[in-house]
Amino acid sequence: MTKVVILKDGILTFVIGPTGPEQRRLANKVMEEALKKARLPFSEIQYIVSTGYGRINVPFSDRQVTEITCHAKGVSYLIPEARTIIDIGGQDSKGIKIDRSGKVLDFVMNDKCAAGSGRFIEVIADTLGISLKEVGELSLQSRHPAKISNICTIWAQQEVAASLAQGVPLSDLLAGIHSSLAERIGRMVSRLKIEKEIVVTGGGGKNRGLLRALSEVLGEKLIVPEEPLITGALGAALIAREMVEGAKRDKMVLKTKERQLEEIEIL
Amino acid sequence: MKIDEVYSMIENQFNQYGSRARQLRDEGRKVIGYVCSFVPLEMITASGAIPFRVRGNIQEPITLGDTLLETIVCPYYRSCFDLSIKGRYEFLSGLVIPHACDSMVRSYSVWSYSLPYSYFHFVNVPTVCEESSFEFFEEELKNFKRSLERLMGEPIEEEDLLKAIQLYNQNREKIRTLYELRKSDPPLLSGTELMMALTVGSGLPVDESNVWFDRVIKAVKGRNASPLIKGPRILIDGACIDHIELVKLVEELGGNVVADTICNGTRDSFPKTEESGDPIRALSRRYLDKLNCPKTYRANKAGTFEGDIASRFGDIGAYAKEFRVDGAILYVYKYCDPFGFEVPARKAYYEFIHVPMLHLEDTYSAGNLGQLRTRIQAFLEMIGG
Amino acid sequence: MTEQQKEVKPRKRMTATKAAASIGPLVKEFITETLKARAEGKQKLAYTFIVCHHEEILRAMDVIPIWTENFAGVCGAKRDAERFLQRAESLGLSRSLCTYALCGIGFDQWREELGEMPPDSPWGGMARPDFMISSGQILCDPRSKWYQASQQFMPDVPIYNIDLPYPLFQRDQDHREVWGYYHKYIVKQLRGLVAFVEEQTKKKMDYDRLRELVDLSDRTWNLIDETYRLRKAVPCPMGTGDAMNTMVPICFMMATQKAYDFFVELKKELEEKIARGEGEVENEKYRLMWGGGLPAWYALNDFNYFNSKGASFPVETTYRMVAPLYEMDIPETRDPIEHLAWRWLGYWTFWYDKARKRPGSEPDVERLINWIEEYKIDGIVMHEAFSCRTWHVGLIWQLHQLGKIYKPIPLYVVGKDGKKEVVMKELPSLILESDIIDITSYSEVDTRNKIDAFIETLESYRVNRAY
């Protein structure tokens, strides 16, 4: 996903757009949309920070900062009691320890294989012909969650298909898949010494089935912000504001990129 | 990082790694390849042969090597084997492998039967570090000496050995001097430049390596500014990191690499050999005791965990202090047993000395650098304040 | 909390011999005894590793060994290793490391944190030791680093690390040129062990008792070799599946009368089966060698699968940790410690002389060739366990080298001119891949498919064999 947050005194506006290989075009598109929504000319944006995997592909960003630092800032702004953040995205998952000012104290990442991220659920849901929106709710209907023994996404896919053919209820399999992912995420996060409050962000935060499984694995309650997809962009915007305020204070001029959105034609 | 004539000079030599060795072979000299800090280079030099540090290539996918050697082996070592099988090191007359880790020892037959060199020798370095271990190691060194004498067709006299020891100590002093130039803030030479310079040195005969380091020291001292922008001062901890990609990445993202405890860094070059007394005894002490590597088991004399780690990793703490380090990166290869088992203890030690540490597990492939980038950048953001 | 479906437990494995079937309770017994001894507190308990030639020393001083590798294997066989592996990972240890060690370290950390055994510990768990005796030798780094890592959670438990090197096979040097100083070092290391145990137990070594125990283990070694040689019979009376059970007295009960008696019984059982013409497999079609690799402890049923296809396993290199003393060319000595050191060197250099005589050969390859001929082997199976460099690095090369220098099977093939001709081919081989106790690396479907394909190859060799 490609997201943008525009900050003034509070969040002025935000846009969540699709992801894809043409990151430059998507960045331009969501920026355009957000400016329209906020009724602002591009020139009025004082500083732009980009984050995430595609952060180097945002041509108009003034600075790139990692998602880890941005999520920390964003979550701390929304939920000041947060001390541990678990970000579950489509490509990776992260655990971040923060202090009360939103500064990162420690972090762990799992970006090495699909089975450690939301992709695991996506692939299997796809196999079963179920949309991502429904998959979490369906899993909550399970009485007897199945145990999925394979940790490789491809093998798990095969295992689920075989079990379904043998008559195992769909909701049980989905619950099993959610537990499996929750266990892996829990295992990764346990490398940090987890402290309350625990906040979940990213697409995973919208999946109630995953949240319940993760809460069980950790034995703790989880907090999810209203819009769990934008905490990274929000953090980036907060950092941008800090840059502007810092420059004003030190009487320095900030280097910024030209405020121009590219006209990209689809050939 | 600023590119100036000093950088270019170093990079130029770095890109020619192996060409001098090839030249020497053409002149009729015997060049002996080695991996690992445990190989007694003084002995090879004293015999008249030239030791050459074999490297892998992180940019080159491992192909031929995998048909003969399992993939569950240290990936850096696999790369070295792959390049050897592909003939990149055809100028070598032989290879010396020490008892340093399972990956090396258990693949010894695979190497010695698959590669065309007539000379292959295994130096059995003891696992523990007691009085009886030194006695054993001295006998092993004498055995190594005999094997080299057979290869070269002439005896190694005591004065040859003493001379070699002196040359290597001089080499180490020069490297020390280079490291001193990293103490300024920001350092007068970048970590990238230092790694390249050290690599060049390990591919030359020791006397030429001494000349090389003199040249580098003079050039760097001639600078009036650092090539780097001031940033968090980083120590790299790990085994053999024979490529510059990691250091380059750290410095590209704003870190200043000013210190290390890696094999082809301080582990190779800081400990010196005693120049007085029996040279074989001096070598056994230097390689088994002074060299600090996880492969050498050091008994817990303190009886507490804190005492144990302070004793095992004291040199890291000393470097961290000496080079005023802000953070450390522990870079461990997947499938590395000696370092892998020490990660929790090292982590505890870095907490003990209040140095933030980033632990990276890597597979020695260029494709993995993207994942390292995010972690390193996040770490630098974290300690940068 | 919703009820989790019970994980399907593996079907109980069928053994070919009664002796092998009796092992399960035997292991449970000695684990239970360690827990009892801990509770009573009269004898000292030591974590230690197998094949260090030191059981005689420990037993002479009434120290009870806690075999940490065995416990990890038990967790693996019960398919209950995952939670301990995960615990180790959460400490920062990589899953690519020896999974026995990860299981052990994870278990130790948990036990120390709780102050009691982790819940539902397999067979009661591992008792807290009084000291730990490790030995990496020159083949296993984890065995040198494992207890050191566990000591972080048990700082009051001291370690003695025995250095036990042996000379690697070098084609340009006879091992006898160096084994004098190897022997000297090993003797000093073992004497150091004796001194350590004396200090820990506050007792003095009884050298008469030690001499008796060394003599007992020598005799046991010879008996084991004689017993296993009976498996040369056609049909083969006992396979590798059983041997993965009978390794228990070899590795965990050496220097006890019980171990010796076990092999007396097993030998008798095999002799009786041979007299009756009874094999491991009813209709034996293929005789296979387990050429290398630790077994996948959670998948020992795969041996029954092989059996069901007509394949027997007369011999394996894994856990064959003894060699006949009377075939070792080692110096005689009255001192038991010096003898142990010679036995150590004799075992590890056993195949060196033979390997030197055959061009292109090497000790492990030489052993394969000798046993292929002695046990009439049709094919070789290797198992690559990803977390163990010690026993698995080099297997691919061994097969490759074996194929290069040894082509014993005459097959009919159709030549270029359309006529039938005889070609000497190398033995067919199969490489299975998973791990020792990490079950997530294993796919039963995949493994069985590979086995099926291998059987087809063996069958085509059998049918097209020239003579």
Image (cartoon, rainbow, N blue to C red):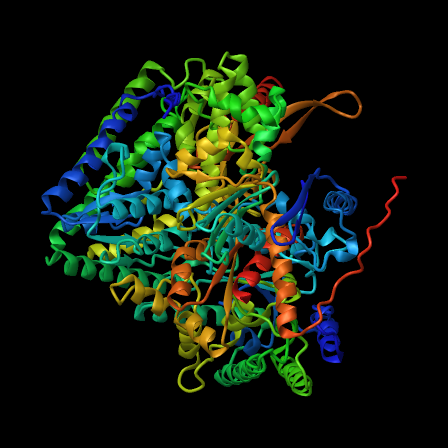
Give the x, y percent position of residue C344.
32, 52
- Number of numbered markers: 0
Q: Is residue C94 above or below residue A166?
A: below
Q: Which sits in the foreground, B85 or C141?
A: C141
Q: Is residue C289 above or below residue C67?
A: above
Q: Is residue C20 above or below residue A186?
A: above
Residue C373 visible in the current orientation: no
Q: Which sits in the foreground, C294 or C17?
A: C294
Instruction: Please report the residue visible at 42 percent of the width from the left and 27 percent of the height from the top.
Output: C299
Hey, which quadrant is residue C411 in on the image? top right
State the quadrant of the N terminus of chain B: bottom right
Give the x, y percent position of residue B78.
59, 52
Q: Which sits in the foreground, C175 or A139?
A: A139
Left or right, A262 with respect to C234, comes to: right
Give the x, y percent position of residue B41.
54, 73
Left or right, B83 with respect to B353, comes to: right
Residue C46 visible in the current orientation: yes
Left or right, A127 with respect to A103, comes to: right
Q: Which sits in the foreground, C316 or A216?
A: A216
Give the x, y percent position of residue B77.
57, 55
